[in-house]
Image: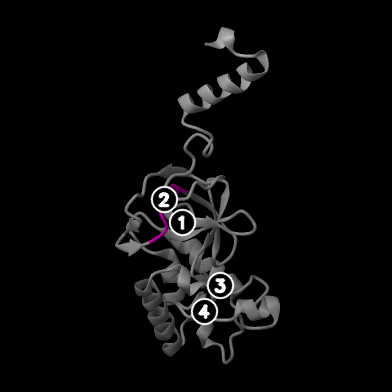
């Protein structure tokens, strides 16, 4: 067939055959798996077709890796790439309780092998996900439960109704017990510190 095909069509034809044999151009060597073909995934990607990890309904992509750095109370480095913990917002390092929030997350995750379930990257290219230790301790929820972060309700519709209830309950309990940042008379939410205002809280279906 190739000898009857005009020369200008042969190269594209061969390229199509090559891509088909390699499985197409969706990603870099299987670095991302699941429903969303995201690039630049940290750690080692493993299938997570059930979208369930440690009993939680989560994003369809699952990665594993070692936490090499804790930047603050809601951002870590896993195998060289940044992970932003979803559903929470921790005090900025320049805020009151910012250093304590970072220390809380460091005690929980630094040097640990973790699993991260996620469905998106943020505007800075970071994976936004739910982080679990080897014994299924949910780091995002733990930060809220010990008073080291707020439940970030501006993005509450991105998680399940059960997840929203868990985060809401954890924050209410920490606040009632005046744990961590809630020991302050009037703690300033990090989004107010950054932007000077409260975001709109969406109504979820």
Left or right side of 159 for 135: left
Of the two numbered discs 1 and 2 on the same chain, state the one appearing first in sequence: 2
Residue at 36% x, 49% y: name it.
48
Left or right side of 164 for 125: right
Residue 202: mark in rendering: 4
The reply to whether the C-beta atoms of the residues labelled 1 and 2 are less than 8 Å apart is: yes
Counting other residues with Cα less than 10 Å from the Cα at mark 4, is it few (<14), some (14-19), or many (20 or more)?
Answer: few
Left or right side of 81 for 94: right
Label 2: state its secondary structure.
strand
Q: Nearer the viewer, mark 4 or mark 2?
A: 4
Residue at 48% x, 80% y: name it.
203
Of the two numbered discs 4 and 2 on the same chain, state the one appearing first in sequence: 2
Q: Which residues are magenta?
A: 58-65
**Marks 3/2: CA distance?**
23 Å
Label 1: state its secondary structure.
strand
**To which residue does mark 1 refer?**
118
Residue 90: mark in rendering: 3
Q: Nearer the viewer, mark 1 or mark 3?
A: 1
Is residue 39 depicted above or below 4 in this figure? below
Residue 62: mark in rendering: 2
Which residue appears farthest toward the bottom when viewing the image?
Answer: 185
Residue at 38% x, 70% y: name it.
160
Of the two numbered discs 1 and 4 on the same chain, state the one appearing first in sequence: 1
């Amino acid at each position: 067939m190739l000898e009857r095909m005009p020369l200008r069509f042969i190269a594209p034809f061969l390229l199509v055959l090559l891509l088909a044999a390699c499985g197409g151009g969706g990603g870099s060597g299987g670095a991302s798996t699941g429903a969303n073909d995201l690039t630049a995934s940290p750690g080692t990607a493993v299938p997570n077709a059930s979208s369930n990890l440690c009993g939680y309904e989560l994003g369809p992509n699952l990665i594993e890796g070692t936490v090499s750095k804790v930047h603050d109370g809601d951002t870590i480095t896993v195998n060289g790439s940044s992970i932003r913990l979803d559903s929470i917002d921790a005090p900025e390092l320049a805020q009151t309780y910012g250093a304590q929030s970072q220390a809380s997350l460091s005690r929980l995750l630094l040097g640990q092998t973790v699993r991260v379930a996620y469905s998106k990257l943020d505007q800075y290219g970071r994976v936004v996900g739910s982080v679990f230790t080897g014994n299924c301790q949910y780091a995002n929820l733990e930060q809220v439960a010990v008073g080291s972060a707020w439940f970030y309700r501006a993005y509450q519709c991105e998680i399940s109704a059960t997840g929203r209830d868990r985060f809401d309950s954890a924050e209410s309990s920490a606040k009632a017990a005046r744990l961590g940042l809630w020991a302050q008379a009037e703690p300033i939410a990090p989004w107010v510190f950054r932007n000077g205002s409260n975001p709109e809280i969406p109504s979820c279906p």
